[in-house]
Image (tube, grey):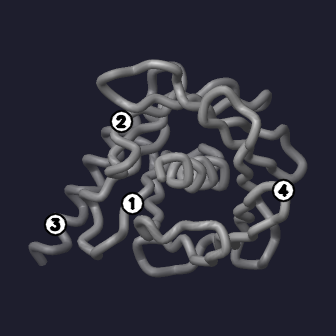
């Protein structure tokens, strides 16, 4: 009974952080994302949600993200010729997105995620330790943290309802690559 009460309390706190809307939390494996490897992104209930397929190409490394039916929802590729850390996210039927590291920020790591259909999303926090937030127009739309999961070598990605889940998860995978 007490466990159910604590679970409801945590859900209420999450909803408050995201303006009262529902949130989804996905489970990612820490430091196991690499080109050439495959893994599943799961819900906190253990249901498989997306597969990350690591492909090593001749020209540039690629991570393809597929839904459970095997449909490609995003492709993450490192841009080899760039002044600062940059990765592109191709999305079938939607404009490509770009994730770039901010030039200078001594206190916290900052990135921007930009695409024509979503505008600009700011990402800041401790990327290496998986403790950061996605913000659009000053409102938090997603958060990445190790605090919610007790499993070793995992971290959670909490996404507010109404957001592009595949894009945020692809950006999280891209940030994991950029932080290595």
Query: Which of the two discs, 2 and 1, labels the residue nearer the N terminus?
Result: 2
Instruction: Using the rendered view, name the quadrant where residue 97 is placed.
Output: top right
Left or right, 70 with reference to 105: right
Mark 2 or 3: the one toward you = 2
Mark 4 or 3: the one toward you = 4
Residue 147's x, y, as percent?
Answer: 24, 57
In the picture, the disc for residue 112 is: none
How far apart are the alpha carbons under marks 4 and 2? 31 Å
- Rendered residue at 48%/33% (across/down): 123
Viewer-side residue, 171 vs 23: 171
The residue where tag 4 is placed is 59
Mark 4 or 2: the one toward you = 4
How far apart are the alpha carbons under marks 4 and 1? 32 Å
Dot 4, crowdedness within 10 Å: few (<14), some or many (≥20)?
Answer: few
The residue where tag 3 is placed is 5
The residue where tag 2 is placed is 125
């Amino acid at each position: 009974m007490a466990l159910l009460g604590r679970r409801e309390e945590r859900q209420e706190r999450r909803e408050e952080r995201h303006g009262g809307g529902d949130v989804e939390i996905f489970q990612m494996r820490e430091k196991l994302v690499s080109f050439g490897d495959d893994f599943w992104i799961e819900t906190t209930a253990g249901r498989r949600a997306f597969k990350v397929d690591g492909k090593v190409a001749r020209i540039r490394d690629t991570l393809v993200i597929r839904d459970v039916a095997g449909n490609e929802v995003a492709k993450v590729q490192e841009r080899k010729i760039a002044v600062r850390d940059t990765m592109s996210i191709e999305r079938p039927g939607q404009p490509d997105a770009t994730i770039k590291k901010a030039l200078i920020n001594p206190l916290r790591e900052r990135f921007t995620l930009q695409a024509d259909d979503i505008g600009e999303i700011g990402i800041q926090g401790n990327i290496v330790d998986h403790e950061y937030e996605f913000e659009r127009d000053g409102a938090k739309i997603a958060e990445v943290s190790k605090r919610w999961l007790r499993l070793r070598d995992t971290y959670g990605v909490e996404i507010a309802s109404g957001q592009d889940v595949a894009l945020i998860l692809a950006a999280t995978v891209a940030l994991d690559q950029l932080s290595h």
